[in-house]
Image (tube, grey):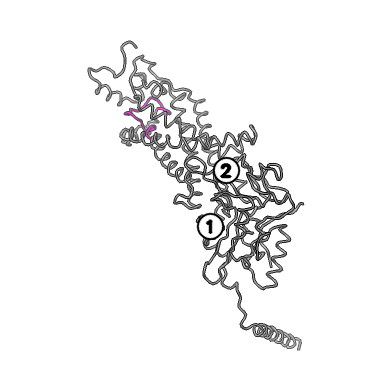
Amino acid sequence: MATRVKFLCDADRCIECNACVTACKNEHEVPWGINRRRVVTLNDGKPGERSISMACMHCTDAPCAAVCPVDCFYTTADAVVLHSKERCIGCGYCFYACPFGAPQYPRVGNFGSRGKMDKCTYCAGGPEADASQAEYANYGANRLAEGKLPICAEMCSTKALLAGDGQIIAEIYRERVLKRGYGSGAWGWKTAYKETIAV
Amino acid sequence: MVKQARRLAFAIAVALLVGSGIAAAQQQPTSVNPTASAVKEEQLLRQLQSVQGRITIPDAKAAVLIQPGGRDWRDLHQVSLRWIGGIAILGMLGVLILFYMARGTIPISGQRSGRRVLRFGTFERFTHWLTAGCFIVLAVTGVNVTFGKALLMPLIGADAFAGWSQWSKYAHHYLAFPFMVGLILTFFMWVLDNIPTKLDVDWFRAGGGLVGKGHPPARKFNGGQKLIFWSVIMGGVALSVTGLLLIFPFAGTTIADMQLAQIVHGIVSVVLVAVMLAHIYIGTIGMEGAFDAMSSGEVDENWAREHHALWLEEERNKAPAGGQRAAGPAE
């Protein structure tokens, strides 16, 4: 599958139910204090309020991978950005560089500083063997290896959060915008993929 | 005739356009555009440099939706810092090698006298080596973060390099604290001897014994040593403050603050490493007899007269019965 998978959150559909956040935590048994996905509400309580579900966007030319001092990141054939916790030293540089605040750190190091980084894997696990116990313990479920899409998008009750081949989800979003006549855009796409969806 | 026809066609076209526009507006006169007042990503990014909202999970920093500032930081870290560090460290090494080839070890001109004078007591040497030892480990492990991926990783492999870097991080975190202790002790121990005076101006004007002939007179510390002292103090304080901000993420700082702190930390450290290379050079192979001051603590009297004539005189006057302090007759 030589596709380029992406996330797209249709802010005009997101109702801030946080099901994606919960589903993600449950699917991967993400530890307390770490959120691989979150919902941010802009203009809260005002006209034009919008909520956006955000996680690692699996950027093209990912900044985290560029700044990592131990080169622990790699990109899969589907363009999912993954990392090796074996190599990660918890320096926090990926967090400085990430435009989306995706990298998370358990507070285990000396002085309560950062442990090994954790982030959204696009439900694609890590460098260990697919669906192995070690992979599950470190990165959570590998749904992609089972032919499934990320749980957050599958769970989304309003289908605001889309995951899958970038071209296909862009087409779905474009059709929606044309049909309903408005759309606040593909949040983060320009930053992550250096392109946006022209309607 | 032709002109008139054209004008007529244009007038009809305008009328049609205006008419259709009015018709469209009349079709949906009360339609609500739900996105009219909605926030736009590009507009927010232009105005605020980041997009921030409200969040329901107990992690306030996650309320920042997009912060493209990371892109600038990435450039600073991956490009600028590498250039600055490379130029500062390699440039200084190059200068020192050229200087050594030209000048060699600068000897004590009157040979060694065999009589020794105590220059640095046990506490002074302990403080110096505490700070120096920590600094060397901090420098190596710090430089590793910026240059290790390019220089060391291809040699030892990614996994071995990751293991080494993990220990480097621990060493960097733990040794930062004794380094800060050493810094504070150094400051209080030597600050009175390091206040710049007119003597230092003359010392620099005379070439400081490095260039030109002879050594201008100096007290306990000469102009060059004072420069080292103040570089260590000011650089060390800058590194300590930024380092503490980085070691405790989000302790009153935002991500932009931490990016700035990291850049200041990186630039100040490579400059200080370059300054320390010069310090190490002069203290070891650059000047005959200089290393004694920090190893045994006792320097040769001729060395002291050459480098710190005024200080030697002061020590003589202080010591009772005109003898030299700690200069055993058996020597």
Q: Which residue is denoted by mark 2 in the rendering?
A: A116
Q: Position of residue B322 (x, y in %)?
A: 24, 18
To which quarter of the image does residue B35 belong?
bottom right
Question: What span is in magenta?
Answer: B209-226
Classified by dominant secondary structure, the portion drawn in magenta counts as loop
Q: Position of residue A173 (x, y in %)?
A: 69, 65
What SS does tag 1 mark?
loop
What SS does tag 2 mark?
loop
Of residues B329 and A8, the one nearer the viewer is A8
Q: Image check: B158 left or right of B318? A: right
Q: Is residue B252 magenta?
A: no
Q: Which residue is denoted by mark 1 in the rendering?
A: B57
Residue at image x 58%, y 55%? A100
Q: Classify B304 as above or below B155.
A: above
Q: Position of residue A65 (x, y in %)?
A: 62, 46
Residue at image x 64%, y 62%? A9
Q: Classify B217 as above or below A5.
A: above
Q: Image check: A148 left or right of B286? A: right
Quarter of the N terminus of chain B within the rendering: bottom right
Q: Chain of mark 1?
A: B
